[in-house]
Amino acid sequence: MDEKELFEHINKIELRDGKERTIKSYVLRNNVISPKSAGIINRYMEKYGFFYQDAPLDYSALFGNDNPVVIEIGFGNGDTTAEVAIKRPEFNYIGIEVFLQGFVNLLGQLGDRAIENVRIIRFNAVDVLNHMIPDSSVEGFHIFFPDPWQKKRHHKRRLMNPEFLHLLARKIRKGGYIYMVTDWEEYAEEVLEFSADEPLLYNPFGGFAPPVTWRPVTKFEQKGMESEHPINEIWLEKPDFTV
Ligand SMILES: C[S@@+](CC[C@H](N)C(=O)[O-])C[C@H]1O[C@@H](n2cnc3c(N)ncnc32)[C@H](O)[C@@H]1O
């Protein structure tokens, strides 16, 4: 693929062409690929990145091994993704993010630090899950500090809603988990409440979960803490007896 094609692919981030009015959980600010970003993309995209395709992902081919796969949605600048992958090397990680600078930042880190168990895609996570991720194939999902869409009229843009949670639940294997953390209390309570109605999942903690040892403070968590927001963790599992 030549450089022009490569950049065109990177800047195509959803299935629809943008003319249709669909609800999106993100806003895009800047799609311009700087010379520095271009260098990182040219060096590392082939090894650590992949593109949207309307076909199930072959995890073994992507990672070169059969370790269980954890998917992180909305990794932001990716610093946390890189640290978690280093701390928990027994898993493979797929990172999904639409934010260009964040995507390129993580791509650069993966390459420069030779972090072998992460692959990333710049695309709308909803499309990736619906078209590329087979049901019952994922060990876990990480969703750290999803945009809270604070105004009531924007709540419909929140990534986590009952329909999306059901999609995640379908994608994890029996015994798999969904791990969400947010500093927006009302969002946390809302997710906790509707997750109780999701038949494929249960909450082993019966409420908010204690923090795990392996998750570093994320960029958005830091901002939340500076504003004295409480950090709430939600950990849900798919029990062994579900279909
Ligand atoms: C508030 S930031 C949190 C970033 C990071 N997890 C952290 O804690 O620092 C949420 C991120 O989710 C990304 N995002 C939102 N909806 C998405 C979607 N449908 N597909 C991919 N990324 C999405 C946004 O681009 C944004 O970078």
Image (spheres, rainbow, N blue to C red):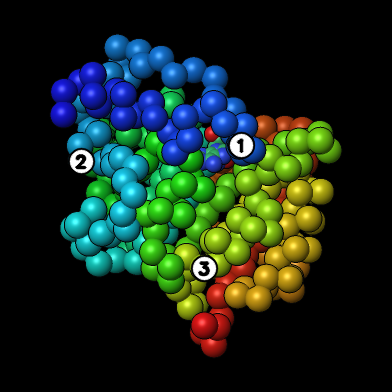
Q: Nearer the viewer, mark 1 or mark 2?
A: 1
User: Could you tell me which residue is drawn at 74 percent across and 53 percent down?
Assistant: 188
Q: Are marks 1 and 3 in contact (CB under 8 Å)?
A: no
93, above or below 100, in the image = below
Residue type, mark 3 in image: Arg
Query: Which residue is the site of mark 2?
Result: 47
Q: Are marks 1 and 2 in contact (CB under 8 Å)?
A: no
Q: Quarter-wise, where is residue 151 in the image?
A: top right
Determine whether, in the image, residue 83 is placed left or right of residue 211: left
Q: Quarter-wise, where is residue 219 in the image?
A: top right
Query: Which residue is the site of mark 3?
Result: 170
Residue type, mark 1 in image: Thr
Q: Nearer the viewer, mark 2 or mark 3?
A: 3
Q: Nearer the viewer, residue 79 or 155?
A: 155
52, above or below 140, in the image = above
Residue type, mark 2 in image: Lys
User: Could you tell me which residue is drawn at 43 percent across and 26 percent down?
Assistant: 100
Q: Is mark 1 within 8 Å of ligand 1?
A: no
User: Could you tell me which residue is drawn at 78 percent across and 63 percent down?
Assistant: 193
SS at mark 1 in the image: loop
Q: Could you tell which of marks 2 and 3 lies nearer the N-terminus?
A: 2
Q: Could you tell which of marks 1 and 3 lies nearer the N-terminus?
A: 1
Determine whether, in the image, residue 124 is placed left or right of residue 191: left
SS at mark 3 in the image: helix
Distance of label 1 from label 3 (alpha carbons)? 23 Å
Determine whether, in the image, residue 49 is placed left or right of residue 80: left
User: Could you tell me which residue is drawn at 63 percent across and 46 percent down?
Assistant: 159
Position of the N terminus, as image quadrant, is top left
Q: Position of residue 93 (x, y in %)?
A: 37, 53
Query: Which residue is the site of mark 1?
Result: 22
